[in-house]
Amino acid sequence: MSDRLNIVVVEQNRDRAIQIVDALNETGDYDVFVIGDVSGLGRQIAARLPDIVLIDIENPSRDMLEELTLASGPLDRPVAMFVSGAAGGLAKAAVEAGVSAYVVDGLRPDRLQPVLAAATARFQMFRQIRIELEETRRALEDRKLIDRAKGLVMKARGVTEDEAYALLRKTAMDQGRRVADVAEALVTAQGLLS
């Protein structure tokens, strides 16, 4: 596996695409692929499995920005977007859509490396936050299931909460499953029987 960064550049203007590729080659050792036709952009990007996507838009509209952003898979990889002008309010929309770096008038060779680094760092930070958020949500859902299952066991067996949890835990250990999975099965079965 190559250590070289695999970069996809989305640029419809051939001359600009050449400038970007030249600028990238001046600043680092990358595998660069240019997409000039944005039809089926998501499919084209997915086929390349890039480490990062650079999108250059001269005059973006909100619809174009959203379409390009969503097609580039900003939750799967860092996406850096370069726009020619401030394009009022689009930076917020781009960031909300998951763009890791939104750069106005910034496509200069000396700025590419720091923009790539910033986009990658920001993407990693948000990915870690998403993972932690998902783990927290799952833990809360597991806790709710376990509490419901404990209530069912307490009612059916006439035991205390601690004893109900101990029974769920022992069952999970005996079956090589998670306590939450045993609790979910019990709650589901109770729902079918009531």
Image: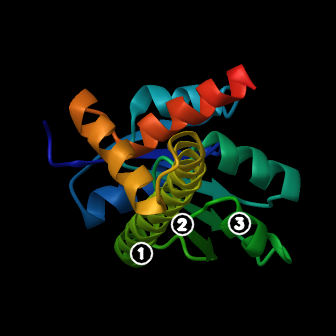
> Which structural element holds mark 2?
loop
Q: Which residue is mark 2?
A: 100
Residue at 47% from the left image edge and 49% from the top image edge: 18
Q: Which residue is at the far top? A: 192
Q: Nearer the viewer, residue 66 or 150?
A: 150
Q: Position of residue 177 (x, y in %)?
A: 31, 34
Q: Which residue is mark 1?
A: 118
Residue at 50% from the left image edge and 42% from the top image edge: 157
What label sits on residue 187 in the rendered view? none
Q: Nearer the viewer, residue 180 or 37?
A: 180
> Which structural element holds mark 1?
helix
Q: Position of residue 184 (x, y in %)?
A: 53, 36
Tag nearer the camera, 2 or 3: 3
Q: Are marks 3 and 1 in contact (CB under 8 Å)?
A: no
Identify residue type, mark 2. Ser
> Which structural element holds mark 3?
helix
* Relative horizontal placement of residue 49, taking residue 146 as reference (left or right): left
Displayed quadrant of residue 175: top left
Residue 152 seen: yes
Q: Which residue is mark 3?
A: 96
* Relative horizontal placement of residue 174, taking residue 167 as reference (left or right): left
